[in-house]
Amino acid sequence: AQTVTQSQPEMSVQEAETVTLSCTYDTSESDYYLFWYKQPPSRQMILVIRQEAYKQQNATENRFSVNFQKAAKSFSLKISDSQLGDAAMYFCAFPYGQNFVFGPGTRLSVLP
Amino acid sequence: SQTIHQWPATLVQPVGSPLSLECTVEGTSNPNLYWYRQAAGRGLQLLFYSVGIGQISSEVPQNLSASRPQDRQFILSSKKLLLSDSGFYLCAWSPGVSTEAFFGQGTRLTVV
């Protein structure tokens, strides 16, 4: 079965600190992409970062980086120097066939 | 560049009334198109997806239907709304298989 698990329903971080959101997944595919999406209070889903499974190097995008462990099927998101605007729901996802499998989300609060 | 438009942003409809939500994509051709529903504080539920004009796949049996009359137009409809149809609806597009999805701004539907 194709699944995504995000074991942390809610997390909080102090402004300017670093936080890591966890994601584990299960897929029968050997080559695939993984994504982190951010959904702020406006509720529009925004792509934060993507990782290609065949690449060993972890993806980075400014303050956002991932720790991708293919053998463990783990894909965590690290947010450095957290800002108030980072407060949002974060979804881990991967494409499967013509569709996508999304995790249940982690709600991140940023404390001033 | 590619853009996705979804409207209306907010809609309040009485029970039993019809529904039509529209989504259009610009700057690309033959996109995969998706309709998702999201309950408050929850994850995404795939309702319909389309890989081409007139090709609609339904993931969840429900009171809704979808149509793709043009390559870059995707419409979500209902003949008679139910209270349970209330929610946040997101349209998304993808360039193809195993690539990321890009989302519209969403429609908040309240059935009263």
Image (cartoon, rainbow, N blue to C red):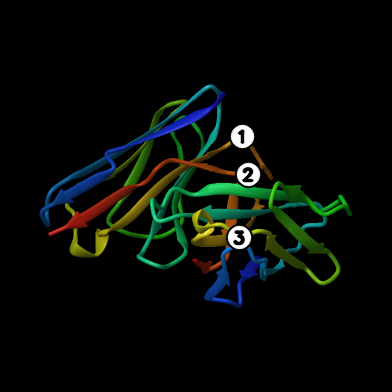
Whether callout 3 and callout 2 share a subunit is answered: no
Whether callout 1 and callout 2 share a subunit is answered: yes
Observer-nearest of B75 and B108: B108
Q: Is residue B19 left or right of residue B103?
A: left
Quadrant of residue B61 within the rendered picture: bottom left
The percent position of residue A80, horizontal first and vertical second, equals 68, 59
Bin the neighbour count of mark 3 within 10 Å (Cα to Cα): few under 14, some 14-19, many 20 and up.
Answer: many
CA–CA distance between discs 3 and 1?
Answer: 31 Å
Subunit ID for the residue under disc 2: B
Residue type at numbered disc 1: Pro
Residue type at numbered disc 2: Glu
* Image: B27 above or below A53: above
Residue type at numbered disc 3: Ser
Bin the neighbour count of mark 2 within 10 Å (Cα to Cα): few under 14, some 14-19, many 20 and up.
Answer: many
Subunit ID for the residue under disc 1: B
Observer-nearest of A110 and B67: A110
The residue under the point 25% across, 59% down is: B86
The residue under the point 45% across, 54% down is: A40
